[in-house]
Image: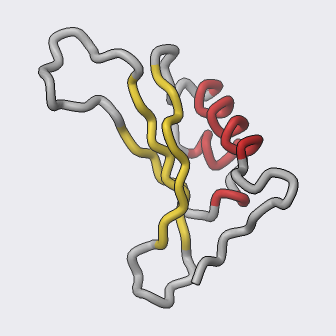
Amino acid sequence: MSLSFTNPRDPENRALRGKIEEWLRECELIAAEERLAAVDEESDRCGPNCPHTETVLRIEASVEPAGESLGESSDRELRIHKPLVFVRRADVRALVR
């Protein structure tokens, strides 16, 4: 059972994803050579009937850092413990602390 909201005017939440990437850049959580590769909602791992979801931001480096061997990834994830549609600038700023 999915509890996520779908905006009928933006069913893929592209506008919100763009705002989140903008906020990540404002807070210097994404470097110029990185991009927000994916935004997913996942259930908190508290059980099959758990209504809690979190937003997972997958950040991908567009170039491999010098000296990094093949097979190693500089991609990373940031998690905000609320559904995507409830994420706001303050939630992204809180990731800095």
Front one among 87 and 68 = 68
Image quadrant in which the N terminus is located = bottom right
Residue most extreme to the right: 9
Position of residue 58 measured from the top left corner of the image (x, y, whole percent)? 45, 42
Q: Quadrant of residue 4?
A: bottom right
Identity of the residue drawn at 46% across and 15% down: 33
Q: Percent position (x, y) of residue 44?
A: 45, 72
Q: How many labels sit on residues? A: 0
Q: Position of residue 74 (x, y in %)?
A: 29, 29
In the rendered view, how is the structure colored? secondary structure
The residue at 62%/33% (across/down) is 21
Where residue 41 sits in the image (x, y, percent)? 54, 61
Q: In the displayed structure, does residue 9 sit left or right of residue 48?
A: right
Is 5 situated above or below 88?
A: below
Name the residue rendered at 73%, 68% in the picture: 5
Q: Is residue 9 left or right of residue 41?
A: right
Residue sitting farthest toward the top? 66
Q: Is residue 40 above or below residue 24?
A: below
